[in-house]
Amino acid sequence: MRPAFTRTLVSATAVIGIAAGSLAGASAGFAAPRPAAAPAVSSQDPTVLAVNNLGLSVSQAKRWQCFLRSYDFNPGTIDGQLGTNSWKAAQRFFNYYDLYVNRALTVDGIVGPETIKALQNFLGVATDGIAGPDTRTAFADFTGYVSC
């Protein structure tokens, strides 16, 4: 096809399309579909990316990370931010020392009820899977005995 003929054909098709759309009452059938709006927030589980220090200060969290590292469970960077790598190390520690309550923990870095129960078992507090005041206090107290 020649370029001039192609332009004419495209222009004529556009005019016919516009006319048909106006004759049809500008129905949505001739309109281009709208692109799907991007979600305002990620659909990924926020707990995976969140830092969960369970009430520990940065220095206390660093001591917990140092404790895990001293037992050869690598928490990643010792930064006082208990993120996914720190909790994966803790879950491996809990599994290795058989501290889980019902079954072996999934090493996923998510601080769910089973991880809390294992931590509570380790700390010697009631194992209810809820990181309440007693668990947080015991965790903070424990880190007071750890050096980095």
Image: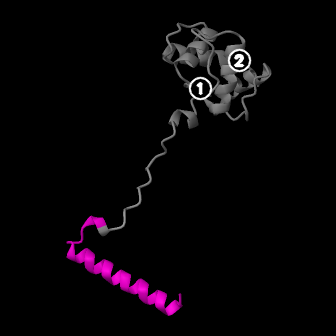
Residue drawn at (60%, 17%) of the image: 139
Q: Is residue 7 magenta?
A: yes
Q: Which of the numbered marks, if any, corresponds to residue 109?
A: none
Compared across the picture, whether 61 is left or right of 36 comes to right
Compared across the picture, whether 14 is left or right of 41 comes to left
Earlier residue among tags 2 and 1: 1
- Residue furthest to the front in view is 1
Which quadrant of the structure image shows residue 146?
top right
Which quadrant of the structure image shows residue 107?
top right
Q: Position of residue 85 (x, y in %)?
A: 67, 31
Q: Nearer the viewer, residue 53 or 72?
A: 72
Q: Badge 2, how many Cα within 10 Å: few under 14, some, many 20+?
A: many
Residue type, mark 1 in image: Leu
Q: Specify the quadrant that holds the C terminus.
A: top right
Compared across the picture, whether 3 is left or right of 78 comes to left
Q: Which of the numbered marks, if any, corresponds to residue 93?
A: 2
Query: According to the image, label 1 marks what residue?
Result: 56
Q: Which residues are magenta?
A: 1-29
Q: Is residue 118 magenta?
A: no
